[in-house]
Amino acid sequence: MNLVERLYGEHDEHEKNMNMLLAVIDEGGDIQKLKEAFENFAKELECHLKEEEEALFPELIERLGPQAMPVYVMLQEHEMMREIVSRVRELHSKGEGGEEYIKQLIDIVRQHIMKENNVLFQMARQVIEPDVLEIRDEIAEKVRKEFGVS
Ligand SMILES: [Fe+2]
């Protein structure tokens, strides 16, 4: 598979998971259901961030050289997402819903996806040859196995 195509597909998957999660929040009440919907989304997200960081970003940083700033901005946003995920998990362990943090996370992820889809991935297609993207995809596949995500 082509790595960029895979990552686009995973963004679509996040969008579905986030919509499900928002639907559970709107229903209100059932904390167990909320936790499950959150973990379903968060596990996929954490895996995806690692795939980008290990398979795509190093190649992109090398190719872009001094113009790699957008990649570093994406990395900062990844850290922000991870912090909110752990904050929500902490609240869940105390029996709280953490709905406000979840909504904040969803906003950040949606904006982040737009930037990657419209800017970063377009750059990747321009500067990385398709056959290299095929090879780098094997790294993403390995990360998914490590995360136990199919
Ligand atoms: Fe992404």
Image: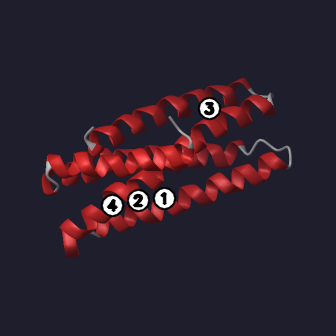
User: Upstream in the sequence, badge 3 or badge 4?
Assistant: 3
Mark 4: amino acid: Phe
Q: Kindly identify the residue that appears in the image at 46 percent across and 55 percent down.
A: 50
Q: Nearer the viewer, mark 2 or mark 3?
A: 2
Q: Evaluate if marks 4 and 2 touch, with contact meaning CB atoms under 8 Å apart.
A: yes
Q: Nearer the viewer, mark 4 or mark 1?
A: 4
Which numbered circle lies on residue 78?
A: 1
Residue contact at pointers 2 and 1, CB within 8 angstroms: yes
- CA–CA distance between discs 2 and 1? 9 Å
Residue under circle 4?
57
Q: Is residue 20 above or below residue 120?
A: above
Which of the marked residues, 1 or 3, is nearer the chain's N terminus?
A: 3
* Tag of residue 53: 2
Q: Nearer the viewer, residue 126 or 131?
A: 131
Residue that extends furthest to the right in the rendered view of this protein:
94
Instruction: Say what amino acid the circle numbered 2 marks.
Output: Glu
| Helix, strand or loop at mark 2 | helix
Q: Earlier along the polypeptide chain: callout 2 or callout 1? A: 2
Which residue corresponds to mark 3? 21
Number of other residues with Cα within 10 Å of mark 3, as a class: few under 14, some 14 to 19, many 20 or more: many
Asked if ligand 1 lies within 8 A of label 4, the reply is: no
Residues under numbered marks 4 and 1 in contact, where contact means CB atoms less than 8 Å apart: no
Amino acid carrying label 3: it is Leu
Mark 3: which secondary structure? helix
Q: Earlier in the sequence, mark 4 or mark 1?
A: 4
Task: Give how far across and how far down residue 69 sits, in percent.
Answer: 30, 69
Q: Is residue 101 left or right of residue 137?
A: right
